[in-house]
Amino acid sequence: MPPRWTADAAGLIAGYLLDAAIGDPRRLHPVAGYGTAAAALEQRTYRPHRTAGALFTTIAVGVPVLAGLAAARATRNHPAARFALTAATTWTVLGGRTLRREARTMARHLDAGDLPAARGRLNHLCGRDPSALDEPELARATVESVAENTSDAVVAPLVWGALLGPAGLLGYRAANTLDAMVGHRSPRYARFGTPSARLDDLLNLGPSRLTGLLTAAVSPVAGGTPKETLRVWRRDRDDHPSPNAGQCEAAMAGALGVRLGGRNVYFGRSETRPFLGDGPRPSAAHLRRAARVSGAVGAVAVVLAAAVAAARSTITAGGGGGGGAGPEGPFRVRRRS
C-alpha cells in the first residue's frame, strides 16, 4: 500500500481504472441516489426566486462536501483506508467509459441508417428534442455532448479530486448534478436554478480550459494536429454562450476537422449558436474519433491529477499539516448540451 502522502494520488488512478474497466453500475448508482435526494430537497425548498435556489444549492452541495471532509479526516492516518475511499469516490463520480460507449452506440445506429434508434438514444447524452433531427444533426449533438462531458464527467472531477481529495470529488459531482437538474432555462428554474448554474460555471472555469488544451495535445489520435486544434480553439471558444462548453466544443471541432454549432431545439424552446470549427458537419465516423479523443484526454488528465495530489499531500505533510491530511485536516478553512 502506498505511503499516506500518495494515497489520494493512487486512489485517483485506481478509481479512473475502475471506471475505464467497469463503467457506471447499471443499478443503484450513488449519483442517481443523490439526484433522488436532491429532488426531494427541491420540493421542500422551491420558491421562484434566487434566494431559495441559493439555499437549495448550499444544502445540496454542502452536505456531500462535509461528508467528504469527515471521511477524509477519519482516514488521514490510515493510508489503506484513504486509498480505498478515494478510489471508490473517484469511480463513483467519473463517467468516461459510459460517455465513450454512448458515442459508439450512436455511431452504430447511424451507420445502420436506424434513425429511430439513434433518436431514442440521444437523451442518454443531452436534452435536445431528437424527433426531427437527421443524421448530421444527431452526430453533431453527440460530438458536442462528448466534448462538454469530457470536461464535466472526467477532467473536472479529477481536477477537484486532486486539489481537495474526496470532498472535492463529491462536491464537484453534486454541483454538476444540480446544474443538470435545475440549471437550465425554463419557467420553473429561470431564477431558482441560477445559483446552481453559476456554481457549476465557476467550478468548471479551469477544467474546461484544461480540457481544451488537452484535446489539442491528443488531437493526433483523431487525425488532427495540435496546431490546427489550437487555432480553432483560440478563434472560436468564446463565441459559445456558455463560458465553459465553448472551450471544449471548439477544441473538439478543431481536432476532428468538423463544424459544430447551429440551431438546437429543446422541448419547448430553441437556441441558435455560432458555428465552431471548419469543415463538414459530423458523421458517424467522427463519433468514434471523438470517443478516442475523450479517452486520451482522460488518460492524460488522471496522470496530471495524480501528480498534483501527490505534490499537495507531500507539501502538506512536510509543512506539519497533519501528515498528508490535505486541506481537510485539520479543518482550515457538478446533461445540458
Image (cartoon, rainbow, N blue to C red):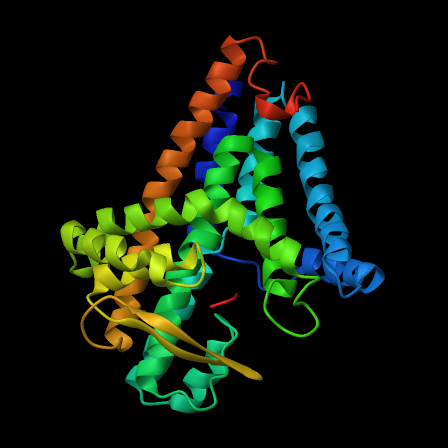
Residue 118 in sight:
yes
Which of the pair 157/108 is nearer the observer?
Answer: 157
Q: Who is closer to the viewer here, 292 or 226?
A: 226
Total marks placed: 0
Relative vertical location of residue 100 with respect to residue 168 in this rendering, above or below: below
Name the residue at 24% across, 57% down.
235
Residue 303 at x, y = what percent? 36, 36
Residue 248 on image: x %, y %: 36, 56
Q: Residue furthest right?
A: 44
* Residue 282 pos. (x, y %): 27, 75
- The answer to which quarter of the image holds residue 104 is bottom left
Q: Is residue 215 above or below residue 326?
A: below
Image side of residue 226 versus residue 292, left or right: left
Residue positioned 32% across, 90% down in the render: 113
Q: Residue at x 43, y 22 (%)?
A: 311
Residue at position x 30%, y 63% from top?
290
